[in-house]
Amino acid sequence: MNLVAGSYEKFIWGFKVKTGETPTLKTIFSYPSHLSTIRCVSVSGPVAVSGGTDDAIKIYDLNNSSEIGSLMDYAGTVNTLCFYNPSSLSYPRNLLSGFDDGTVHIYEVDPFVLLKTVKIHKKGVNDLGIHPSGKLALTVGRDSCLAMLNLVRGRRSFCCRLDKEASIVKYNSEGDKFFMVKEEKVSVHDSEDAKSVFEMESQKRVLCIAPTSNGLLFTGGEDRNVTAWDTASGNVAFSIGDAHSARVKGIVVLKNKNDGSDSHLLATASSDGVIRVWDRRNMGEEKPNPLTEVNTKSRLTCLA
């Protein structure tokens, strides 16, 4: 299993998560890959990408621990990146990127070719999430709108005004629900009609989320906690208080290498440069200890 983190100082960090009786994080690469701050990263199989305020998307081969190319479309800061990886393939099929000019770019991955540019928002795209079917995606933008992108036809098919700007939108693994973050609130929506089922409220602003296949949603943010929510009831299942000594900027449920299912490992990253790996089976304890951690000594901005 691999972890990739981006930083404010332009550095990209790659780690190999070695599982076993005592999991470890081994650094496989670390260098200034962008000309300015890295805003987002995404990983699928052996491929990783990062986007930054230098308007560039960098591509990495994790098997060889090397950078293999760049995508330069000059549409503004790259705010979000998301791979579509069909369950039948070990390699991603498409990459979607959201830019500061309000456009979403759709790429074919092998080879990396721009298929379509779609204007979605009047202002920058904050985040996007791809439905497990690969037929549609949701986006939220700085224009306080939620939009749907038809990936079969390559056009926007729906757009509605929100009461407040949303920063994150993600589907669950089944695709029957999606989650939307507005500051300290996380709303759960039915995918069929986009209606809000209920809201879950954190103590402070939520900066990252990670859905799981068993109905839990992990969140992290400015309260420095890692919280697991039951998405069927909206209640807190369990929480790690002061999981980090700074804001939690990234949270990832690691996948099993053999079948791609969710493993029992959870990785988190904070703005003070610390990455920690936790055992989800121990998170119901009063104060669980991380299985392993590494300090990058940089201001981390994202994790995948």
Image (cartoon, helix red, strand yellow):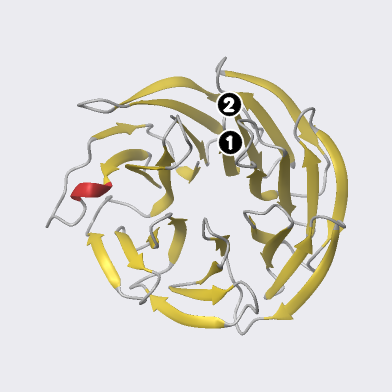
Judging by the rendered image, the residue that carries numbered circle 2 is 46
Relative placement, left or right, of 33 versus 25 is right
Residue located 24% across and 63% down the image: 238
Q: Amino acid at mark 2?
A: Pro
Task: Answer left or right for 125 relative to 190.
Answer: right
Q: Amino acid at mark 1?
A: Ser
The residue closer to the viewer here, 271 or 144, is: 144
Q: Secondary structure at mark 2?
A: loop
**32, 121: nearer the viewer:** 121
176 above or below 76?
below
Rendered location of residue 158, percent (x, y): 78, 74
Q: Quadrant of residue 154?
A: bottom right
Q: Residue furthest front?
A: 88
Q: Is residue 221 visible?
A: no
Task: Judge whether 196 appears above or below 272 on screen.
Answer: below
161 and 228: which one is in front? 228
Residue 301 shows in the view: yes
Return the mark for residue 44: 1
Cα separation, mark 2 vs mark 1, equals 6 Å
Residue 153: x percent and y percent? 87, 57
Disc 1 crowd, CA 10 A, few/some/many (<14, 14-19, 20+): some
Q: Nearer the viewer, residue 3 or 99?
A: 3
Residue 245 drawn above or below residue 225: above
* Residue sitting farthest toward the left: 286
Give the residue at x 35% y 77%: 233
In which quadrant of the rendered view does residue 143 lie?
A: bottom right
Under circle 1, the secondary element is strand
Q: Residue at x 40, y 61 (%)?
A: 217
Is residue 77 toward the left or the right of residue 225 in the image? right
Label 2, residues with CA under 10 Å away: few <14, some 14-19, many ≥20? some
